[in-house]
Image (cartoon, rainbow, N blue to C red):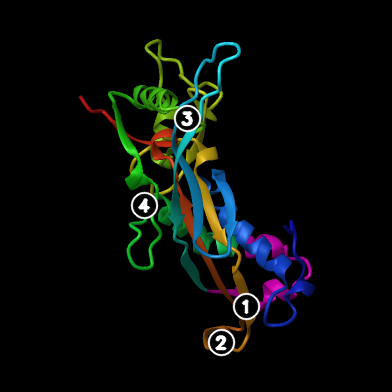
Amino acid sequence: MATTITRTEFNGNVFPPEVADFIADSIIGGAPFTATLTRRPSRGNLVIPVVSAVTGQGWVAEGADLPDVDLTTGSEVVAVKKLGGIVLITREAFEDATWPIADEVSRVVQDAFSHDLDLGLLGGTGAGANPLGVTGRAEEITGATLTAAVAAAVSDIGEAGGRATHVALSPTAAATEAAREGSDGHPVYPSGMGSLQGLTVVPVPGLTSPLVYDAGRIYAVAARDFRVERSVDYAPAFKGDKVALKITGRFGAGLPVPVKSIRRLTVGAA
């Protein structure tokens, strides 16, 4: 995947694959929650095999026959949904040799799409054009405080056979927790809050309920038909002396074993 782009790569109406890859990576990288997940490419909808139960195995006496192990299997079909739009970038940005064009393109596409990508993979209903998000499939864990709820979620995921790695919080919740003081009046997190009970803290704008999750068991599915096209003839671009970038990509969230993967937190419950 490209790590930079240059002005010469913007020649022609259809961008070369490395530019589309750069823009797709910028959009995913600018979505705090999605960026932490395990990425899975797909041609379209992705079928994820699921082993829901394993039976028959056990301790065996020396010389005894080994038992047959039975697997109860299934699958989760991740339906990818289209995210797209047309963004406009000034011609000056493309023509000014001193302007960092790669940074500008990344900023613009992140502002346009990254937040929507996160919100879709988190809270999408799956109806119509919306992807099916993970929040509605997460079991609820309650705690009198954020730290108590996080501890309960880590324990619950662990007892189910998973291993929590991240806690997603709204920026407000993250800042409030980071500023918390102990009974002695000193900050609980004097060096800042990069982690909470060993979990990486992920501030996600617009997140309504904190989430504790195992990023290795949740998949950000991206279809391979991500496409970027350039035009200066698109009417709003022509009138504004800008370059229009038509961007389309299909994304979804895979959550094959929710009980081992994620918990939704309710803080302050009795």
Q: CA distance from mark 3 to mark 4?
A: 22 Å
* Secondary structure of the residue carrying numbered label 3: loop
Q: Position of residue 175 (x, y in %)?
A: 43, 34
Query: Mark 4: which amino acid?
Result: Gly
The answer to whether one can see residue 193 in this image is no
Q: Amino acid at mark 1?
A: Glu
Question: Residue 229: which numbered mark, if any?
Answer: 1
Give the residue type at disc 2: Tyr
In the picture, the disc for residue 234 is 2
> Which badge, 3 or 4, comes first in the chain's sequence?
4
Q: Is residue 167 left or right of residue 210?
A: right
Residue at screen point 36% across, 45% down:
135
Q: Is residue 177 above or below residue 224?
A: above
Q: Which residues are magenta?
A: 86-106
Cα separation, mark 1 vs mark 3, equals 42 Å
On the image, the x and y values in percent for residue 83 come to 48, 66
Question: At 68% from the left edge and 61% from the top edge, which residue is drawn?
Answer: 22
Amino acid type indicated by mark 3: Gly
Neighbor class of circle 1 (other Cα within 10 Å; few <14, some 14-19, many 20+) is: some
Residue 162 marker:
3
Task: From the image, state whether disc 3 or disc 2 is nearer to you.
Answer: 3
Gap in angstroms between the C-alphas marked 4 and 1: 29 Å
Q: Mark 4 — residue?
A: 123
Q: Which structural element holds mark 2?
A: loop
